[in-house]
Image: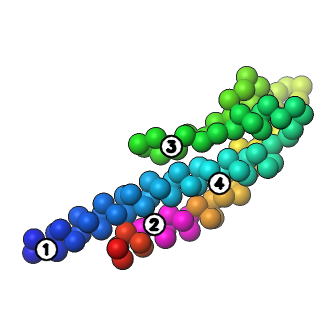
């Protein structure tokens, strides 16, 4: 019984590690896609898009004063979403990557 518990604990730890690695990769894929679709005038907005992995997940941000206005629009300017588009475009692949990480955790 103790051996089974050790095996299960090992599988859970492997799965957790695999999922954390995959989350970082998903963040990078979202950044790549956001940089591909973001409107570019000077390149500052595109260059400011980054991902940072944390212990709880991944933070993806565009670090300019005006990123929010481009993404959501204003009363004088139509929205030109790039983050939402990037997330939507990578959603299916992200699901596959997470599924694979879980399976690898169980299979060792």
What crowding class fits label 2: few (fewer than 14 Cα within 10 Å), some (14-19), or many (20 or more)? many
Element marked by disc 3: strand
Position of residue 1 measured from the top left corner of the image (x, y, whole percent): 9, 75
Marks 4 and 1: CB-CB under 8 Å?
no
Label 4 and label 2: CA atoms lie apart by 16 Å
Position of residue 8 measured from the top left corner of the image (x, y, whole percent): 24, 69
Where does label 3 land, which residue?
Answer: 53
| Mark before the other along the chain sequence, 4 or 3 | 4
Where does label 4 land, which residue?
Answer: 29
Q: Residue at x 71, y 34 (%)?
A: 48
Where does label 2 land, which residue?
Answer: 101
Is 30 part of what is drawn in magenta? no
Label 4 and label 3: CA atoms lie apart by 13 Å
Label 3 and label 1: CA atoms lie apart by 34 Å
Q: Residue at x 79, y 31 (%)?
A: 44
Marks 2 and 1: CB-CB under 8 Å?
no
Marks 3 and 1: CB-CB under 8 Å?
no
Where does label 1 land, which residue?
Answer: 3
First to last magenta residue range:
95-102
| Mark before the other along the chain sequence, 3 or 1 | 1
């Amino acid at each position: 019984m103790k051996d089974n518990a050790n095996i299960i604990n090992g599988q859970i730890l492997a799965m957790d590690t695999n999922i954390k690695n995959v989350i970082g990769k998903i963040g990078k894929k979202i950044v790549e896609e956001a940089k591909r679709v973001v409107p570019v005038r000077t390149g500052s907005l595109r260059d400011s898009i980054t991902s940072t992995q944390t212990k709880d997940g991944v933070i993806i941000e565009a670090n300019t004063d005006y990123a929010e206005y481009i993404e959501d629009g204003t009363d004088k300017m139509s929205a030109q979403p790039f983050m939402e588009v990037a997330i939507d475009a990578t959603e299916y692949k992200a699901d596959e990557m997470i599924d694979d990480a879980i399976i690898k955790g169980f299979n060792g």
